[in-house]
Amino acid sequence: MTDWRWEQLIGPKAPLWTVYLRGLPDIDPIPLPSGFARSPGCTFCEAREFVDIVVTPPRHLHVDRGFEGGVATDDSGDEGSRYVGNLSFAALRRRCPLLASTRPIELQKCVEAAWSDQTSKIQGPAGCAVIWREVCQTATVWQNGQPISESRHKVRVRITVTIRRGDSVARRTRSLGVRLREIWQADRLIAAIPALLDSAAVAAETALLPAENLYDAGSRPLLFIGGSAGLIAHEAIGHPLEADNIISGASRLAADMGHEIAPQHFTVIDHPRTVDGFGSWDIDDEGQPTRPVVLVEHGVVTGMLTHRATASTLGGSSTGHGRRLSACGPCMPRMSTTVIMPSIGDPLTDAAGLDETIVCWQVGNGYVDHDTGQVAIEIQEAALLRHGEPVARLHPFTLDADLRELLRRIGPIGQGLDLCQGICMKRGQWVRVSYGSPTLLLMAR
């Protein structure tokens, strides 16, 4: 079977990060960020230093930088305070050596060279914008009067391509995010920009082609590629197995610990220390060391995500998943990098043998309703296949299914593993997360 899924539908696949699901050595606490002094009752403080580099060919470059921070004065964080300031570009680099490790001019040259190659292939007016955002968060937690600190350096490149053809306009975005631990990782991210830009351009051109509406997504098998099936694990497994949802009785999986809910080849792990994971950290926002948690093993529910309060209620120890948006928000058990583990299936071959299949390579938001047990996944980019060959592009649609039914429909799972990056919202607080999966075939109802 030819590799139609990238070349014909979304362009060449960007060189994503190799995923190492292994623990990292414990890190030594770093000094407190300058300017911070512990006030009475302080339990958590943070400093976020950031730089935004925006490149819009031809010859437009904008750099923005700044500093923000906050202090929490009790365990709930409800009395937290925040402040915002400005720092020079040089000061940012002194305070966080990895921050802005890539010179803006070098980034601009890379983007403009890649865009110059694209303009010769695109028919009609077109434009692109590349946003390179780096954030270095220094989080400090006090335990028994002693500070525990961690520096979390995240970078995300977001590429948007817009193409106009007559009265029609199409806009498509591709992004890649990672936690930087070494400067060479930034070089790998820059090296991925041409392929990401090419992918966004091909997707925008494809979006101008005629498309069909899909009225019943569950009536055909869905083939998820490029890590997109990881959103199923995030919504249908991760949120129901966050300990606060289990304790409150909201989770539909609260009574399923030790029971089989999915096929035996289905395993889901949340790993906060995944190398390069956009949602990874080594010490959580309560100062607890993180560890991977096997949420589902061979189809059986085996674990949950806890922080100190929920672990105490359940009579166990924290898994190191306590996270907060900022010092002004309460700590809650949250996901980090949630992945469906590879198996020995061959979903592509299986899909080629079916009369009709929907192939999905770009998902949007997801949602799980704890009251009804319904899971909703936004499918942003998809195509209809007949006997393994694409025949029509599909308008965006939503996959709605009962949580248990969705898990029962899990079909063959491939052997690779791709990561996607996103933002997870819970009770008004967003955090950075990653999710991923091999190629996965979701069977029809």
Image: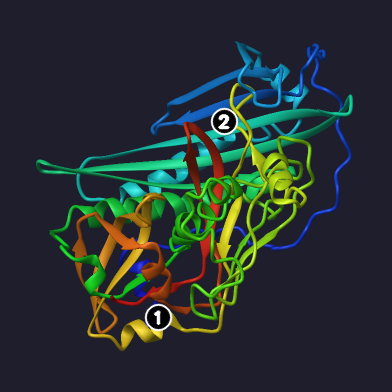
Q: In what element is the residue under mark 1?
A: helix
The reply, left or right, for residue 207 in relation to residue 353 is left
Mark 2 vs mark 1: give the one in front: 1
Which residue is the site of mark 1? 348
278 w.r.t. 344: above or below:
above
Residue 137 percent coordinates (x, y): 68, 30
Residue 428 percent coordinates (x, y): 47, 31
Which residue is the site of mark 2? 105
Residue type for callout 1: Leu
Who's the residue at 63% across and 39% down the image? 154
The reply, left or right, for residue 202 in relation to residue 384 is right
Who's the residue at 22% across and 40% down the image? 125
Residue type for callout 2: Ile
Check the picture and name the quadrant holding the N terminus.
bottom left
The answer to which of 226 and 375 lies nearer the viewer is 375
Q: Is residue 396 visible?
A: yes
381 w.r.t. 221: above or below:
above
